[in-house]
Image (spheres, rainbow, N blue to C red):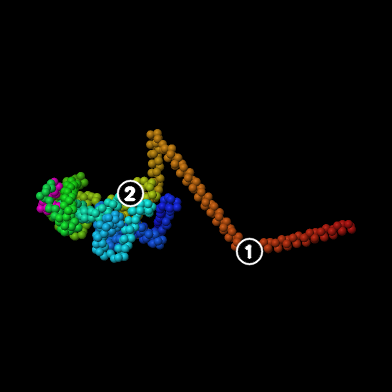
Amino acid sequence: MLKILSMLVCYYHADLRKVIVEHLGSLEIVKVNAASLEKVLCEFFEKNNIPWNNLVMYLKEIAMILNLPASSPQRGFVPHRWLSAYDASMATYAMMPAYRVLYYGFLSTADKELYREPLELMYTKYHVNQAGRARIKVVQEELNRKVTNEEEYVLCFTGMTPQGRERKKRVCQKLWHEETTTVLRLSIYMGLLAILKEYVMVFQGSQTLVHKLHDRQLELFLAFMACFVKAEHITQLSPRALREMVLEDHMLLPSKEVYVGQEADTFRSQNPNHALLVPFLADVRKAYITTAVYLQKKLPLASPTLTALSALDPLLRGHSQATIQLKRLSGMLRHLLPADQDIQRELVRFNVDLTIPSFKEGESIVEWWGHVFDKPDKYPSLSAMVKCCLSIFHGPRVESSFSLMNEVIDQRSGNMNVPTFNAIQTVKYTLQSRGKTAVQLFRREDVKFGEVDRTLCKNINSAAATYKRQQKMNQKEKQQQQSKYGSQASGSAQQAKKQTAEEEKRARLRHVAKQRKRAMETLVVQAKKKMRSGSESITNCVLKSQEGVFQLLLHCLLYLLHSLLYCLLYCLLYSVL
């Protein structure tokens, strides 16, 4: 299905002395995504010689000259929606040289003289040739002109308000005047937030990992604490002790050993006495302690439920601790288990059952527990309990439901009621969970003699009648409530409904008249074609008819002459006699 991309341009018209909006062009697009949109827009701009005179294109051009990856920060980096700060840190650090070159054009004349040598060193580091340096200089002069010339700046670069100019000053301050501090902070962000990303990404897949929740969050907490706490004070503690631990100065690592990221660690080793290093490390230690206290408060490190769920791991079977934790789990879920079954006896038997196959590397935990579910007579209570535990909701399924919702509800279906949406979502999730289409799901092997789903056929045949009956019931219920409370639809609503009905009636009549007129025009055209095609035959027929008239008149005249002669003869004979 083709889609139309319409482009409008807004600009200041010097003759009219006002800002006007005009249509720039429309393009046909088959597939809408970032790559296709960028391609058609670039082709359109190049074809019509429209320059990309904005900061984004300047930045891309500078990044290309410096041989920097402007589209992706580095190989193997995958952005994630939960950690936008981490993504921004990685992208900012990767594009730092290009940012510095770009914002050099916004510096004052004095600052440009001050930082001219570092800029030349950057050109040498990234092997920028004379042509590239000349092009960068043109871009910087253009940016400087737009900032210094206030009147032309307002007309040509209207996106930059006084707040925008102030923001440019702050960016220049961070990139040039406080470059070292900016790099140090980005280093700590990139180093620590990567640990959080590893934890988040574990549970963003489709596999069931409810038995890994306790272990993963314990690993996360220990990995974070090891960045600034001596390992001997945390490795031997239980989860409850870790949660209740109070950090003291003798437990913390010295400032020169605290983890600060790769770039900051290199700077610390090369400049141990730098003036900026002491306050930076003090801020890092304070942030570490504050975050650790927050994690102790928020993470359920000593949760008995998560600890018991860890016993579902097939690798723990055969250990006494697995039986103990499964017993605790059965006590938490007693209301879901059969009352007449002895689950403790099942747990003891399960822990030493040699008929259950061993867990293989890469095998799904659900598939492995399926071997236990295949023995309902042997493990009825255990199977019921594990099925409940493996059904605990986690992962990115909530976000996927939003995507499905957007596919169903749009501008054309804004009045869809909840039951209809519920039915559509049910069908979609059913087909998605089975990985089949509707045809594949309800397909019969033998079309002629295969069994027919009578319930499905009945629902299909009665769907329209059920819907109309439900509409009548809803309308009747609404009228009863209105009569009960003495209320009625507002005048504006009734008037709107009446006006809508009249407009629909007029539109319908206009449509009928239009169709009738079109039909009459078609008949006239056909008649004219017939008249043109049969003109010769009509002429011949007319000529033949004229000859027939002449002959008829001749016969009449002869008949009259004969009659006159006969009358004369009769009169003569009568007079003689």
**Which element carries disc 2, helix, strand or loop?**
helix
Q: Which residues are magenta?
A: 228-245
Q: Does residue 79 appear in the picture of this structure?
A: no
Camera-nearest residue between 462 and 214 = 214
Q: Residue at x 46, y 42 (%)?
A: 499
Q: Residue furthest right?
A: 576
**Dot placed on the residue nearer the N-terminal end, 1 or 2:** 2
Which residue was labeled with disc 1? 536
Camera-nearest residue between 571 and 29 = 29
Q: Mark 1 packing: few (<14 Cα in 10 Å), some, or many (20+)?
A: few
**Which element carries disc 1, helix, strand or loop?**
helix
Camera-nearest residue between 367 and 181 = 181
Camera-nearest residue between 482 and 29 = 29
Q: Residue 191 bears which disc, if any?
A: none
Which residue was labeled with disc 2? 162
- The question of residue 503 being in magenta is answered with no
Q: Residue at x 19, y 60 (%)?
A: 361
- The question of residue 234 being in magenta is answered with yes
Amino acid on which the number 2 mark rests in the picture: Pro
Q: Does residue 128 appear in the picture of this structure?
A: yes
Q: Residue at x 29, y 60 (%)?
A: 70
Could you tell me which quadrant the C terminus lies in? bottom right
Amino acid on which the number 1 mark rests in the picture: Glu
Q: Mark 2 packing: few (<14 Cα in 10 Å), some, or many (20+)?
A: few
